[in-house]
Amino acid sequence: MLLPELRETVCNLHAELPRNNLVAWTSGNLSARDPETNLVVIKPSGIKFEDLTPENMVVVDIHGELVEGDYAASSDTLSHCYIYREMPEVNGVVHTHSRYATAFAVLGKGIPCVTTAMGDEFGGEIPCGGFRLIGSEAIGKLVVDTLTGHRSPSCLLQNHGVFALGKNAEGAVKAAIMTEDNAAIVWTAMQIGTPIPIAQSEIDKLFDRYQNVYGQR
């Protein structure tokens, strides 16, 4: 079996999506790229999260062609692979329809950076791209285009949901979780009044500290 450790990682991280209320039923998916072989491990299409195992993960090449697996790969596979080809620093991709973030997406609105946590993680707003149909590379291209010029590791797609990226699969899951958490905070604040903006100069300081000083070094 190819990439047994990466299969196990991807399988285990999928459990974080329902655990953090990012997905419903079989919606959403996660993939990871192996930098050495350029192969991608991704969720099989339409399989419930509780039924996922390392063995039923699907392995494809960087163009989305099946390499190993007994199931059809996720319907978003071609878009994941497009992102990997265009953004070589990315080795993990997560797609969700998480509730609060998708509420912004159906309005075609990005999530404004109005919390210090967003400044830390995203370095600015979480942008929203346009609309594309599932099943081709079109969504992947839109993700790349939407994130160009932004420091955010995630974006929204109009009428669709969230795509979050990371230097590994765990980083992508973290970005998806933090996207939804901040979307919920901002949405709640908007029910009370108008969120107070943070100056970009202050956001820059927050982002620099979190990325370069915070945590264990």
Image: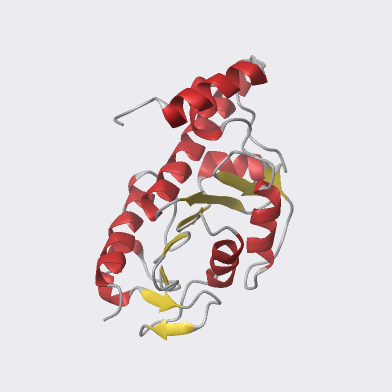
Colour mapping: secondary structure
Image position, residue 177 (x, y; %): 43, 41
Q: Residue 174 is drawn in which quadrant?
A: top left
Image position, residue 70 (x, y; %): 36, 85
Residue 198 seen by the camera: no
**Image: 153 above or below 141:** above
Q: Residue at x 46, y 43 (%)?
A: 175
Image position, residue 134 (x, y; %): 63, 68
**Lateral position of residue 78 relative to residue 46, left or right:** right
Q: Residue at x 51, y 26 (%)?
A: 208
Quadrant (top left, top right, bottom left, bottom right) of the N terminus: bottom left
**Image: 120 above or below 15:** above
Q: Residue at x 73, y 56 (%)?
A: 131
**Image: 108 above or below 64:** above
The answer to which of 111 and 190 lies nearer the viewer is 111
Q: Residue 46 is drawn in which quadrant?
A: bottom left
Count of numbered labels shown in the rendering: 0
Residue 102 seen by the camera: yes
Quadrant (top left, top right, bottom left, bottom right) of the C terminus: top left
Q: Residue at x 45, y 71 (%)?
A: 38
Image position, residue 44 (x, y; %): 41, 73
The answer to which of 126 and 97 lies nearer the viewer is 126
**Lateral position of residue 132 relative to residue 3, left or right:** right
The answer to which of 81 and 75 lies nearer the viewer is 81
